[in-house]
Amino acid sequence: MTPAGKVAPDGSTRKQVSSRFIRREAARTASDAGHAEIIAQRFSILRTRILREMRSRGWHKLAIVPLTNDAGGTYVAVHLALALARQQHTKVVLMDMDLGRPNVARELGVPGCEPVAEALRLGQPLADLLSTVEEAPNLSVLAPEQPEHDAAEFLQDEVYAAELAKLGDLESNTIIIMDNASLLSEDAALAAIPLADAILLVADGRNGTAAHMTQAERLLNGMPPVMGVVLNKSED
């Protein structure tokens, strides 16, 4: 149930949460509108490209995959999800798929949900773990508070895959942004990526190397298609 019996904007009784990140960014915009506009513009352009390609191909699930732990994948996932949610007729679900090191709840500044593995073991649908963000009514999040044990094994479980498929069937205009573990550091990334329709790679624009990309290409052979590479923390 939503707090105090409130009904979410989509008419559901999904729990609502307030995002410290969105409130902080709103305050920052008031004090430094120029910088905020640059960030918003970059993600608006990325949003337009992503939406056009995914809609033309009938895709709904996009994996945000950082090459390394410090590439900033969660930062990109959160900003892209918010940019998508600003589209009036687009529903967005932001999922933390880095279950061994969840960071979406902390980055977005919202209360995390209960452990996913335990919820599914008890027969609770994955959709019941979603919360709607009050400041962005088109955005829902599924973000565990605590790390899950044996994350890679759990992500390959048939029950989880089936529940994720149901989540994608909620509405035809829903885009699921999946924040993944780093590709070159954790096997959980390789376990989660096949659950997506497409991949957006995130590389460290300052410390990333050509060797990282070469290794990524090898690991992604036979995986869903790569839509592009975001150079995060780049000065360009």
Image (cartoon, helix red, strand yellow):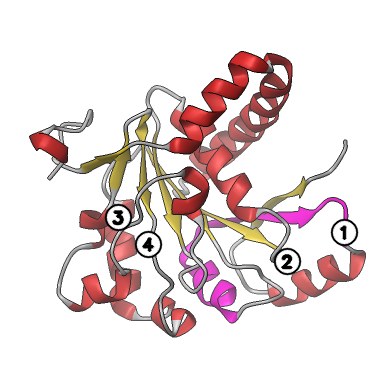
The kind of residue tagged 4 is: Pro
Give yes or no for contact between labels 4 and 1 (Cβ–Cβ under 8 Å): no
Image location (x, y in percent) of residue 80:
57, 39
Give yes or no for contact between labels 2 and 3 (Cβ–Cβ under 8 Å): no
The kind of residue tagged 2 is: Thr
Residue named by callout 1: 207
Give yes or no for contact between labels 3 and 4 (Cβ–Cβ under 8 Å): no
Secondary structure state at the residue bearing disc 4: loop
Secondary structure state at the residue bearing disc 2: loop
| Quarter placement of the N terminus | top left
Q: Nearer the viewer, mark 2 or mark 4?
A: 4
Nearest the camera: 136 or 189?
136
Secondary structure state at the residue bearing disc 1: loop
Which segment is the magenta one?
187-208
Residue at 32 percent of width and 31 percent of height:
134
Seen in the image, is 218 located left or right of residue 25?
right
Q: CA distance from mark 1 to mark 2?
A: 10 Å
Whether 191 is drawn above or below 213: the answer is: below
